[in-house]
Structure formats: C-alpha cells, structure tokens
C-alpha cells in the first residue's frame, strides 16, 4: 500500500537507494489503495499490467524512467530537496495550482469539446484572481511575482 499511496502525490521524490514493488500478487492479493486507478494513468495500461502481474522490484531510477517519481536524489539530501520543493510551491500561485489539478482530473474523463469548455471556465476563474493580476504586473515590471493565493 505504501507505493499506492506514494503515487497519489502531485510531485514525487525518491532517494537513490529507494526501490518500488507493487507486491500485491506476491501475497495473493489485488491492488488496493487506489493503485488500480492511478498506475494505469501514470504508465499506461500495458505497463501497469506488467508491473501488477509480475511485481518486479524497481530501482529509483527505473521508477523515474516510468514516470512513477519525478526526481531521484541522494538519500541524505531527500528531506532538503523535498522542503525546497515545498517552499517553491508555497510561493507560487496556489489557486492556479488547485484549478490546474481540478482541470487535469476532470478532463481525463471528458471529450475534447467538454475539456475545452472546462478550460475556458476555469481560465476565467483564474483570470479573476489577485495572483493573476500580480503575475501580469510582475511580468510587465520584469520582477518575480509575489503570489498570495487569492
């Protein structure tokens, strides 16, 4: 279940020493904790079937190559890298992040026409935020934006 839960992270870092195994079938079980939903969306159906049926042990680098993790870092720097990433995200346009996540999750099940309509709706919502105004101002003034999450 640990691998299942880790795959739900928006951005996933792994220590070089880490390994990943979807070991459900090794103990006579089926995937749980959302693994059957998230894994095919990350790696495709054929690769998900291979991983879930054969249950290989993947190195951190192999997991990165498959798109299961975004960055591989030395284990002693993992916490430092995770905190730096968290600080970077916290300083960003958090409302735009939330709308982007909503868009990505919703459009996965929509037709192109429906997805474009949803993009327009959420773009309109994002365009009315203080963060958008600040982003445009910062761009014009050639300075980094100072987002407030509204």
Image (spheres, grey):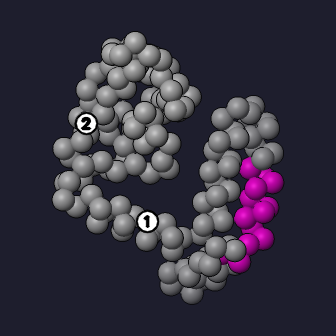
Q: Quadrant of the C terminus?
A: bottom right
Tag 1, which secondary structure? Answer: helix
Q: Residue at x 33, y 19 (%)?
A: 55
- Residue 15, percent across and down? 24, 49
Q: Could you say which is closer to the camera, residue 25 or residue 119?
A: 25
Q: Could you say which is closer to the camera, residue 128 or residue 94?
A: 94
Direction bottom: furthest residue: 141
Tag 2, which secondary structure? Answer: strand
Would you say 14 lies left or right of 16 here? right
- Residue 106, percent across and down? 70, 41
**Would you identify the image quadrant in which residue 127 lies?**
bottom right
Q: Residue at x 60, y 67 (%)?
A: 94
Q: Residue at x 71, y 77 (%)?
A: 130
- Residue 7, percent across and down? 45, 40
Which numbered disc covers residue 19? 2
> Relative to 63, does residue 74 appear above or below in the rendering?
below
- Residue 149 in view of the camera: yes
> Relative to 33, does residue 124 appear above or below in the rendering?
below
- Residue 40 in view of the camera: no
**Residue at label 1?**
86
- Mark 2: few/some/many CA within 10 Å (<14, 14-19, 20+): some
Secondary structure mainly formed by the magenta segment: helix
Read off the magenta span. 119-131
Q: Quadrant of the N terminus?
A: top left
> Relative to 131, does residue 110 appear above or below in the rendering?
above
């Amino acid at each position: 279940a640990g691998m299942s839960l880790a795959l739900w992270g928006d951005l996933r870092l792994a220590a070089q020493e880490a390994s990943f195994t979807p070991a459900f079938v090794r103990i006579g079980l089926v995937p749980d904790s959302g693994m059957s939903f998230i894994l095919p969306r990350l790696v495709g159906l054929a690769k998900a079937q291979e991983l879930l049926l054969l249950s290989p042990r993947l190195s951190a680098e192999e997991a990165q190559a498959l798109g299961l993790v975004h960055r591989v870092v030395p284990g002693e720097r993992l916490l430092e890298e995770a905190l730096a990433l968290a600080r970077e995200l916290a300083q960003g346009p958090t409302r735009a992040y939330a709308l982007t996540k909503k868009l990505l999750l919703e459009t996965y099940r929509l037709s192109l026409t429906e997805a474009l309509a949803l993009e327009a709706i959420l773009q309109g919502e994002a365009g009315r935020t203080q963060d958008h105004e600040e982003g445009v101002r910062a761009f014009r003034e050639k300075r980094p934006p100072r987002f407030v999450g509204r």
